[in-house]
Image: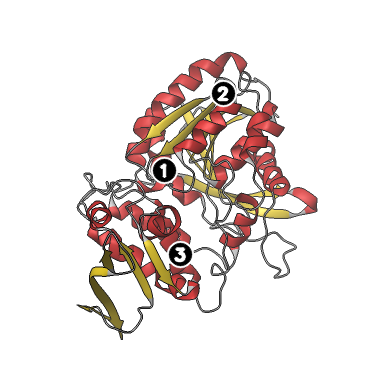
Amino acid sequence: MGVVDDAPPLHSAAIDICILNGEVSIEPAWREPATVSIFASQGTWDQALAIVPPPLFQSFSAWQIRNPAFTITGEPLAIAQCRAFLECLIERWHIKASTADAKSLSLESITGRYHRVAGPQGRNADIFVETAGQGQPLLCLHTAGADSRQYHGVMSGLATVSSYKTIAFDMPAHGRSMPTDDWDGEDYRLDQASYVAWCVEVIKQVICQPVTLLGCSMGAAIALAIAAQHPDLVTAVIALEAPVRPRGRRNAYLTHGQVNAGWHTSAYVRGLMSPLSPLAYRRRAAWIYAQGGPGVYDGDLQFYSDEFDGEAIAKAIDGRHTPVVLMTGHYDFSATVADAKALAGWIAHSRVVEMPELGHFPMTENPGALLAYLVPELERLEKATTPLRRKTHV
């Protein structure tokens, strides 16, 4: 790691972070090439090492993927193998950034059980579904490679302050839901048609009435798709961290034999969160991802990164019939505020809510901060959608 002069490739100062047999040391820069090299100007390092770094300066993945002020070199395999260490290292630099401690989550208001669901193409699965609270159904859709545990903080919080019954389920092959009955060991792959179908069948067979959808990332993408294709099943949509076209999220190292998938995938998660969010919550978010089934995250990205087209979906939504709120954190370099504003431009009467202190997983990394934005939006939507609600079961 080093500081570059105004005239690269010369550098004025550099150090090596050396790892040998689990021991970490800092040495003067060696003459031998480093496994991974990171160089930036002094001004760039000042922002990256600040107690509260600005967006795009908070993590190694932000530096590598979205911040042109950094020059990062190394073999792609080596970078993938080092990602978890580098993310944890930079996370430690910003350990004082969070201004709030993680409150102990009380999950006693959440109940869970399995539901037998007949899915698309004759596939059946036992779907694990969690609920909390009473009132109009709010269906929470998890992100790629994760499960409904992401919403535990929101579900327990809303159970006491809202008139919604929050519901969240694990997609087949995620979390506590096993693969479909006919699974024969083939690679997991997700496409938009089957994803929409699974969500629709859960609404029809388990919830039995139209829902407000609350989805994040991949869950936000499919929430918009459901609203476009099945408006009769959706009273409103709250899309957290919704993308336009999130291309490039897949790479060869998500399922590489020389890369620990749990460490690598959870490292990406660490890089997408805000340094202002409580570290204990961020660790929970990463832990959920570290437990994903083999290839499940990559399989979800076949839909989310390769197939989803937010422009086409947004233009098919009737915002006068189905109100849409797009909520996005400033520290999310994957689905940005610019994405949210673009989507809002294609959906009549939609709203954009910016969350400056949050990242890509607001419901998990800082549920209390998200609730401060979410509860007023739910109250507003409840007033707006009450005359439109269907009284009959679907």
User: Looking at the image, which is closer to me, 229 or 9?
Assistant: 9
Q: Amino acid at mark 3?
A: Ala
Q: Spot the residue most to the top.
A: 387
Tell me if label 2 and label 1 are in contact, CB under 8 Å.
Answer: no
Residue that carries the numbered disc 1 in the rendered image: 363
- Tell me the quarter of the image containing the N terminus: bottom left
Q: CA distance from mark 2 to mark 3?
A: 35 Å
Residue that carries the numbered disc 3 in the rendered image: 290
Q: Examine the rendering and report whether any part of residue 22 can be seen.
A: no
Q: Amino acid at mark 2?
A: Pro
**Left or right of 32 on screen, residue 175:** right
- Tell me the quarter of the image containing the C terminus: top right
Mark toward the start of the polypeptide (1 vs 3): 3
Mark toward the start of the polypeptide (2 vs 1): 2
Mark toward the start of the polypeptide (2 vs 3): 3
Q: Residues within 10 Å of mark 2 (few under 14, many from 20)?
A: many
Residue drawn 50% across and 70% down? Answer: 261
Q: CA distance from mark 1 to mark 3?
A: 18 Å
Residue that carries the numbered disc 2 in the rendered image: 323
Q: Amino acid at mark 1?
A: Met
Q: CA distance from mark 2 to mark 1?
A: 21 Å
**Left or right of 264 on screen, residue 299:** right
Residue drawn 28% across and 64% down? Answer: 4
Residue drawn 61% across and 35% down? Answer: 224
| Kind of element beneath mark 2 | loop
- Residue 96 in the image: x percent, y percent? 19, 52
Q: Is residue 273 above or below residue 253?
A: above
Q: Residues within 10 Å of mark 3 (few under 14, many from 20)?
A: many
Tell me if label 1 and label 3 are in contact, CB under 8 Å.
Answer: no
| Kind of element beneath mark 3 | helix
